[in-house]
Amino acid sequence: MLIALLDIKRPTYFLLLLVSSTINAANLWSEDASSISSPAVLTETDILVDIPIVQVATHMDQTLAQTPASVTIIDRQTIQASAALGVIDLFRLVPGFQTYFVDGSRMGTTYHALGDEYPRRLEVKVDGRSVYESLFSAVDWSSIGVTLDDIEYVEIVRGANASADGSNAFLASINIVTKSPLVGSGWSLNSQLGSGDIRNVNLAYTGDLGSISHRTTLSFRSNDGFDDSSFQGQPLKIDDSSDNISATFRGLWTPNARDSLEFQAGISDSNQGIGEREYIERNLSYQYQYVNWSRLMASGSKLQMLLYHNDMDVSDEITPLFLSQALGLSDSSPGWPLPGLPDKLVIDAHDRSESERWDLELRSIVNPRDNLRAVTGIAVRYDRVKGQELFDRPDSLSETSQRAYTNLEWTSSDRLILNGGLILEQKNNAASYFSYRLASNYQLHPEHIIRLAVNRSFRSPTLLESQQKQVVRYNDNIILDASVISDADINNERLRSMELGYLGYLFDRRLRFDIRLFREQLTDVINERRSGFPDLDNFVNIRDNTDNFNVDGFEIQTQYKPNSQVLLRAHYSYSDISGETIYTSPPALEIRDLGLHSLKHGAGLLASYGFDNGVTLSSMASYSSATKHYRGTAAENYTRIDLKAIKRWAINRANIDLSLTVQNAGDPYSEFYFYNQFKTQYILGLKILMP
């Protein structure tokens, strides 16, 4: 029944059905319509309770009742109560998200579909600055320079958000908002020691440099990764330890009442052990600069200019390999495949790659009428990548893209809010493409809102996806082995989606419910197919538009905050993937089912209670049903329990927190690869705040 209603081919029928149901429900509602206030009017309840304001969905300040999409907010209280050690752990609190460690160095999170070792189709921003890299077509979470201590809150749009954030916000988008330099002052020191040689230290100072308020941080994170394991009955040494050092600066200057200038800069350096059964050492150096200028106009409108620059250098230490070593033959052997040509070093000991981005955006937020708000923006982006191994060329590849967008919010009546978003994007003078979103939020009652939204989104290939040519050469004319080559005619990915949402409040807004029913139809999804190729093993992986599938399901999340001491959060998600991928292309065509990669059931619970004596106890539970990680291995269902206890003391003007965190207080479970066994971890933490 649900699938029939959500059939994207019948949106008109569905819209009529929703409107009819809404009118009937409103007529039956016993409360007089005149007593229902406009969402823009604050009531006494609004003043006494926390009303989250988000920007991630449209770049306008909106309450959850006004947003055109399902949004999850992870606030500061939730972060402190959670048993998370890193940013990636927070997404275990979000319905529909799959979160995992590919190895001890690489972390991944994806929404609904096909999470591999480098998850794509998810826009991630830090204070509005995109941090996904064209070189990986993904986010390297170890390099973004953000620790849990730095975060004020996280906004997550569960669903396509391309109309606001561009084509990479294909399935969902995340904005991590860091602490403002205007909040608090003084020193903060946070350190953690624990199992697996976890050694984390974060030092921060908030203060003033003349008229500039700033927050400056220095952090170090290190761990030894997963324990050694076995593979096919043989011992497997897992060499995936990592360490990272980073420094960030966030400054804010307000020369007058109208203007504000925010500028950020950061650097980080990581050493990582990465691999699948065989490991190499990777050094990753990252830096960024970011400027955000805002001006408030007399009319109440706002102008913004955002400019940022990201730069990443990647260096892999690889064991040198001669052709004779790879073949197990000498160049004098009768089976030598290159008669008359001598042995040669075909894989060097060093491989270096680069990724760089410049992005400039101009944005205007206006209120042309009392019931109408609009965001309009234009932007230009320059991406450059370089890497001999990935692209089979010594020079750089680059592309320039432009985008123009608008998002409108129209309060049609006291009950109805309409949102519309449209973005036009173009790359390197190629054909332009539109993505759009339409949504209506209807207020059945001041505390009960239903939402209907439809999306049409495109995702363009990154430079890696469109230009990859990963080959091993003997010389310019002879390719010994081809790993991955991008198809010359690779196209944009396409998404059509429809969702029906409900947002409800009970007990004076202390209890919040959010329900989302959805259908997502993805076509021309970029993946790899195996094909014949004239090298030594006679095949290659072709990166192409190989996948077509639907994702159907529903999600529920709830939060209960009766007072400042109690916090309860829970979620459940169900999603089912039905579709196919081209595994091998002609002449030996093989089509495979994508359904086995569904994470059909996911659930989570966070419970926290703060006692009057400064002790806070928390527990997190996460459940995942059995699945097969895409490009990983099969994983059984598991339930993970995390525990945390904090004791706070106030000594003179300083606050001291001592904490004990237990992650996975139970049997080990596998993360992405079956031999990566996540065992019980004990972490002791010390935090000192000195104003």
Image: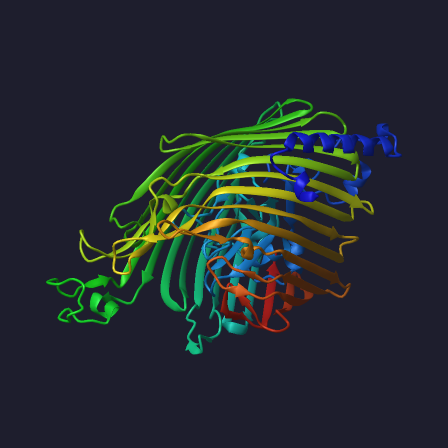
Residue 254 visible from this viewpoint: no
Colour scheme of the picture = rainbow
Q: Is residue 350 left or right of residue 459?
A: left
Residue at the outermost top position: 369
**Where residue 197 sits: x, y (%)?**
50, 72
Give whichever of 14, 22 is nearer the camera: 14
Q: Quadrant of the C terminus?
A: bottom right
Q: Residue drawn at (70%, 50%), measured in percent from left and top?
A: 556
Q: Is residue 680 above or below residue 128?
A: below
Query: Toward which corner of the image does residue 254 lie, by quadrant?
Result: top right
Does residue 203 appear in this view?
Answer: yes
Q: Is residue 303 above or below residue 652?
A: above
- x%, y% of residue 683? 58, 70
Q: As drawn, is 613 to the left or to the right of 437?
A: right
Q: Residue at x 65, y 50 (%)?
A: 75
Question: Could you say which quadrant of the image residue 160 lies in?
Answer: top right
